[in-house]
Amino acid sequence: MHVEYQGDLHCQLTHESSGTAIYTDAPKDNMGRGESFSPTDLVAAGLASCILTTIGIAARNSGRTIPMEGARASVVKEMTANPRRIGRLTVEIDIPHALSAEDLKFVENVAKTCPVHRSLHPDVQIETTIRARS
C-alpha cells in the first residue's frame, strides 16, 4: 500500500496489487472538511469488514452452511478527547438468513476473534451485536 499526502489534510491511499485508491480527509471536528473517510473511520470500517470476512472464512473452513450473502454491518465510532483516539466502536451485524442457535453462537465467537479486533488496543471498547433473521 502507498499513501500520498495531497495537501489540505487529504491523502490518497493506493492498494499496490489492484491499483484501487481511496481517499481520506481529517474530520470536521479536527480541522478537516469531512469530505471523505477519516483515518479513524477506516479503522472502524475495517473492523466491520474484517468481522464479516472472518465469519465467511470460518464458516467455510468449519464446513458449516452459514449463508453470508447480503449480510451487512454498521459501525458507530466514538472518539475520546484527551488523548484523541478511538474510545468505542459499536458494530451491528445483520445476517438476512435464519441461523440455528449453535450457528449464531459460532458467529458471535468468530466476530470477537477477527484480526482487526485482536489488533486494536484493549482500551478501545468494542461492542458487537449480531442479528439473524429468525
Image (cartoon, rainbow, N blue to C red):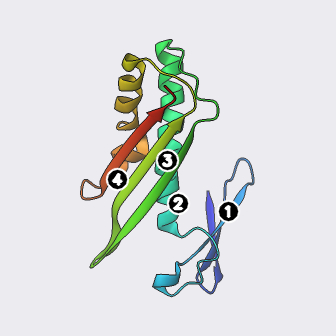
The residue identified by callout 1 is 22
C-alpha separation, residue under disc 1 versus residue under disc 3: 17 Å
Disc 4 and disc 1 in contact, CB within 8 angstroms = no
Q: Is residue 102 above or below residue 119?
A: above
- Mark closer to the chain start, 1 or 3: 1
Image coordinates of residue 105 in percent, x first then y, are 35, 25
- Mark closer to the chain start, 3 or 4: 3
The residue identified by callout 3 is 48
Disc 1 and disc 2 in contact, CB within 8 angstroms = yes
Amino acid type for the residue under numbered disc 4: Leu
The residue identified by callout 4 is 120
* Residue farthest to the front, as pictured: 134
Amino acid type for the residue under numbered disc 2: Leu
C-alpha separation, residue under disc 4 versus residue under disc 1: 22 Å
Decide if residue 18 is on the left or right side of residue 36: right
C-alpha separation, residue under disc 1 versus residue under disc 2: 10 Å
Q: Quadrant of residue 123?
A: bottom left
Q: Select label 3 or label 4 by which is in front.
A: 3
